[in-house]
Structures are given as structure tokens and as C-alpha cells.
Amino acid sequence: MFSVFQKEKRGDEQLLTKPMRTILHALSYSNIEVEASRKLADLKKLDPMRIFCRKLDAQIYNGDHKVPIRLYFPSEEAMIRGIEEGHKLPILLFFHGGGWVTESVENYDRVCGRMSLSTGHIVVSVEYRLAPEYPFPTGLMDCYAAAKALYTDQFLLDADPDKITIIGDSAGGNLTAAVCMMARDKGEFSPQRQILIYPALNNCYTEESPFASVRENGEDYLLTAGKMEAYLNLYQSSPKDRENPYFAPLLAKDFRNLPKTLILTAEYDPLRDEGEEYAKRLKEAGNEVELYRIPEALHGFFALGIKFLHVQESFEYINNFIAVRQADASGKTEQIHKFRET
């Protein structure tokens, strides 16, 4: 039997107290009204806790379309140290969440600024086009074009491909997995690492779903199964898309030769089990994978402040994964497998 690593729950500290469960129930609804949802998401632009860091807006091309890109730079000390040591700074290529329908680079400004400072990486955040105006595969191809430009030195950064990690949360985790799979299939570049944070990887969130977490966590934990079905309906250009592994990476027939992977799942998340199943299939196909379930966490926790315990825990895993895997690529350490079987 396959199992995941997770820290012990924090004693008597229970996130989901009875009052909290009541609040979550009231906030958990399944209908998606696109414009209203976008306006609600855009309130994050007023974030009083915005991180002030060095950043630069740029763009890359996907065909004739200009895809906006925002770069976030780590502390000046980290940049100077890298220059003095003659190193190219490592890069996190980030795809934001939002069900392929909402959110933006601007809304994720604090998340990416903090990510850059916390990891010492340049973060490259991609403003891919959103559904339903631009259904599958438009947003995916924007992300693929950004990755290709970065890995093949067609972008303003002088990047070392071995120091690039692709990362995304939720729908962004889906796009991360799909970009890495597409890169393998096309052979145009070769990502070495991917990080999937509570990724959406399947094509069904009805009672027909094979995953228990959809039924156990699909109603009262903010992200609902009904909302996921609505997102898929908005993302697809036709029902046929749901059979495409670039739409739902769990549908792939071949999981071999994919990047070293870190997957973080949340305990109270309808997407939990599909993320863990994806890790299992990657491992069975011979890939190197680390998988951690964050106890008591809800879907979307990564967008909370850095002082939030689940976010701190996540950055511990992320920084360790990056450090170990980059050392692996340099031949400085032995491979480490973060799985166990019972």
C-alpha cells in the first residue's frame, strides 16, 4: 500500500473547530459566476501586506500573442552573492491558480514576492490567458511558450536550464504537470524539476469520481466538488477535451521520463487524493518523487501569509527539495526518495 509523509497534528490545536466549520460551510458554494468571481479575486490587489521587492514586467510571444511576464528578484544580498560567486541565479517559473478562470499575476503579487525572498530564486510569474474567453489549450500554450523561451535562452534572463524549477498551485499545478508532459513529448526542452501544490489533475468531480477526497471534502471546505465541475466546464472547449492528458494529466498512458517532482496536498481538499495518486503513478514509472500531505490544511492555503504554519511547512519542503535536487543535478549528493510503502 502506498502512503504519504505528513507531520503529526499539532496537539490540541485544531484548525477546524465547530465555529470554523460553520463559517466554512457558509462560504462553500458551488456556483461560478465568472465576472463576480473575478471581481472578488481582484480584491487581493488591495492587499495591505503586499511585499515590496525588486520586480520587472516583461513579455514573451506565443505566436502573435504577447504573454505578460512579471519577474521577482530575491534580496539584494542574494543577488550580489550569486554575482560574486559567478553563479546564474536559480529560477522558479510560476503558474498561478484560480480554476483557469480567475486570478492573475497581480493578485499573486505577494505570493510570488514572498516566494522569491523565501527561496532565494528569481520568480517568473506568467499571465496566461483565462477561460472561458480563451478555453483549453490557450492558457496551457501560453505557459508552454514561456517555459520554452526560458529553457532555450530566448528570454531576457541568462538562465541555466539545470537551475529552473516549474511550480504552480491548483490549476497552476495542472498547467505545470501538463507543460512538463508536453515538453517530454515534443522534445523541445527538458525540465529537471516540477513542484505541484494541491494540483487539479483529474477530469471528474461528480459522484463518479474514483477519489474519496472528492466525496469527503467536496462540500464544506471552501473549494467544492461542484465548483471544480464548473471550472472544468468553463475551461474545456468541448467535452472531448476531458479525454486529453494535457487537460487532465492523470489520464496519461505514459508517466515515464518526467521531472523530479515535489507534490504537496492538503488534508481537507477535494483534490487531495488525485495529487497523491499522481505521485504514485510517477513513482511507479521510475521517476523521483517527494509527496507530503499538509495536516489540517484547506485548498488555497499557499496564498496565505508566510507566518501561517502551513505556508512555513510548505517552504521547508520546497527549499529542501530544490537544494537536494539541484545538488543531485550537479552530482554532489546521492538520490533521496521520499516514499515509503507499508
Image (spheres, grey):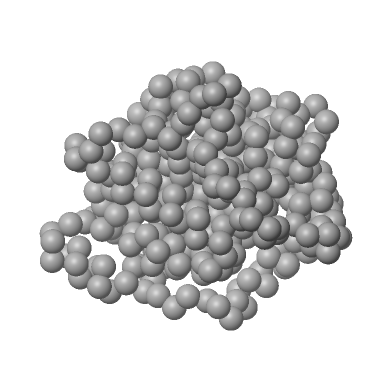
202 vs 315, nearest the viewer: 315
197 vs 233, nearest the viewer: 197
Residue 270 sits in quarter: top right
Left or right, residue 289 beside residue 13 = left
Left or right, residue 324 beside residue 315 = left
In this rendering, does residue 230 appear at all? no
**In the image, what residue occupies the spot 75% across and 61% down?**
37
Residue 305 sits in quarter: bottom right
Farthest bottom residue in view: 48
Q: Position of residue 166 (x, y in %)?
A: 42, 46
Q: Position of residue 104 (x, y in %)?
A: 58, 61
**In the image, what residue occupies the spot 31% across and 41% down?**
325
**In the image, what residue occupies the spot 66% across and 52% down?**
296
55 shown above or below 172: below
Q: Position of residue 131 (x, y in %)?
A: 66, 49
Farthest front residue in view: 11
Q: Position of residue 64 (x, y in %)?
A: 46, 50
In this rendering, does residue 301 appear at all? yes
